Structure formats: structure tokens, C-alpha cells
Amino acid sequence: MGDKHIVRFEPVGIEIEADEDQTILRAAAEQGVQLMHGCKEGQCAACKSFILQGEDVEYESYSTFALPDYEKEEGSTLLCRVHAYEDLTIELLNYDEEIIRSGLPLTKGAVEVISNEPVTHDMRHLVVRLVEPAEIKFFPGQYMDFVIPGTGESRSFSMANTPNRDGLLEFVVKIYPDGQFSQFLSERVSVGDRLEVEAPFGTCTLRESRSSDLIFVGGHACPVRWPSGRWSAGQRSTTGHALRRTCASRT
């Protein structure tokens, strides 16, 4: 572990401690501060922010499409790729204060495979049960990272069920011919196997304080489940959201 530094986020006024060995996004997530993010690999720019104070930072590899050199020179940064080597003040450009303050800390664990069944020629329904810890809290809409044994690589998949189901987690996984996790899942994963996981990630969750209408769009192979798990199309949620669903399929 390296030295720790204080990172303050404006305009929300939240401070975290960031170890030099961690990216700022990772440090925040471990402390339950849920910043906007997407790929976590410096490719999508969802976590792009601006350094207001401090200069001593180092970067892991990233795409210059996400952070062009001229933006970096002006002070822009990618929280998923940057390490702090001194105290920093960072302006968040893309944030939701409700999500930031209601974040759940990252938890590492292990799961046991309960079922790994094909649902089509290129899709799998994976069901696992938490072995340790007994519970990993998450909000509907978030996702979990699965570690691919022997590679150090991980892949992300959204939970397809709501929380609090006796430790059971469901996933619908697309199988790609050359996909590293896809091939591992389709050819090597059996019932009873244990996998390392980490969660929760993602900010595509219901904002309880909002009353605007919600629109869900999905295809026939990926049915839409309401974020609360208890609403029906045409109803109004307990928080006042009107719910509308649009589905489509190719012919």
C-alpha cells in the first residue's frame, strides 16, 4: 500500500482518502461514494472530471478519444485511470448527488454455480449463490465483476434479479465466439464451481426522489424487469413514477 491523500469532490463537498496504489474511482467506490462511471478502463469518459487543485497525479493507460491530450493539459482527468500523489480537489462534471450519497461500498466475495444453462444458441442463464460473504448489497440496475481464473481479468454482468433472494444471483450472458469469459462459461464452468466476484458497480438505478416518467426499452430476447421488481406496465410506482415499456424484435 502507498501513502494516502485526501481527495475532495466539488460541488458536493465530499472527501475520501485515496491510496496511491488505487485509482480515485476505486478508492471512492470502496468507501461507498458512488461516482458516475462506465467502462472503468479509460474508454468511455463517463467519469471525466476536472482537477481544480493539485498536480501530482499518475495515469494508467487510457484512450485519448476519452481524454485528448489538450483536455488533460487543461486539467481534465479520468477518475477510473488516475492515481493521486498529493491532496486534490476535483470538480465532478457528471454526477447525481442522490446516487453519490446513497452508494454501497464495494465487496469482494465468492459464489457457487447453481445452474449454467443455455437459453438460445448464444445466450446462457447463469445462477450462482453467495458463499462468502452471506450478502452483497446492490441496487437493481447495478452489475457484478466476475474474475476469470488464472488470467487476472474480470468481466462485468448485470444482475437479472432483485436483491434479497437468499443469496441467489441470476445473470443472462451473451456468448461470443472469441470472448474470454464467454468461452470459459460455455466450456468450463460446471455446477458446484466457485468463482471470485466483486460488486456493486454501476449507476443505472432508480432515483427514488424523482417523479418523472420512466421508459423501458428492450428486445424479445432480453425481457425488461422493473427496477423494483414489483411494478407492472401502466402502473405508477410508489414514488410517483409513471411506467412505460417498449419492446421490439427482429423478423
Image (cartoon, rainbow, N blue to C red):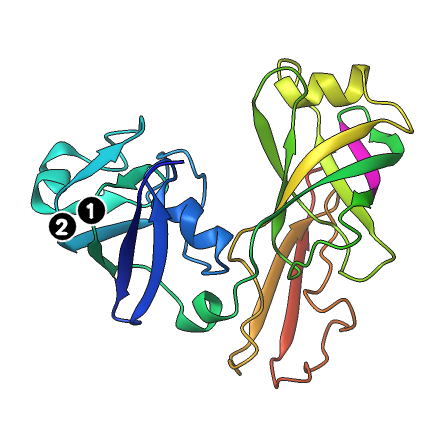
Label 2, secondary structure: give it: loop
| Magenta highlight range | 123-129
- Where is residue 137? Give x, y as percent: 68, 59
Question: Is label 1 in contact with label 2 (beta carbons under 8 Å)?
Answer: yes
* Residue 37 in view (yes/no): no
**Which residue position is annotated with label 2?**
54
Find the distance from the CA under tag 1 to the CA under tag 2: 7 Å
As drawn, 203 above or below 108 = below
The residue type indicated by label 2 comes to Gly
Q: Is 207 left, or right, of 134 in this rendering?
A: left
Q: Quadrant of residue 146?
A: top right
What is the magenta segment's predominant secondary structure? strand
Which quadrant, please, contains the C terminus? top right
The residue type indicated by label 1 comes to Glu
**Which residue position is annotated with label 1?**
86
- Choose mark 1 or mark 2, whichever is in front: 1
Residue occupying image coordinates x 79% and y 38%: 111
- Where is residue 78? Give x, y as percent: 29, 43
- Where is residue 76? Give x, y as percent: 18, 46
Q: Is 57 left, or right, of 83 in this rendering?
A: left
Residue occupying image coordinates x 39% and y 47%: 25
The mark tally for this picture is 2
Residue occupying image coordinates x 75% and y 25%: 122
Question: Foreground: 167 or 169?
Answer: 167
- Where is residue 84? Give x, y as percent: 26, 43
Residue occupying image coordinates x 62% and y 61%: 216
Which quadrant, please, contains the N terminus? top left
Q: Is residue 184 magenta?
A: no
Label 1, secondary structure: give it: loop
Q: Quadrant of residue 116?
A: top right
Residue 174 is labelled as none
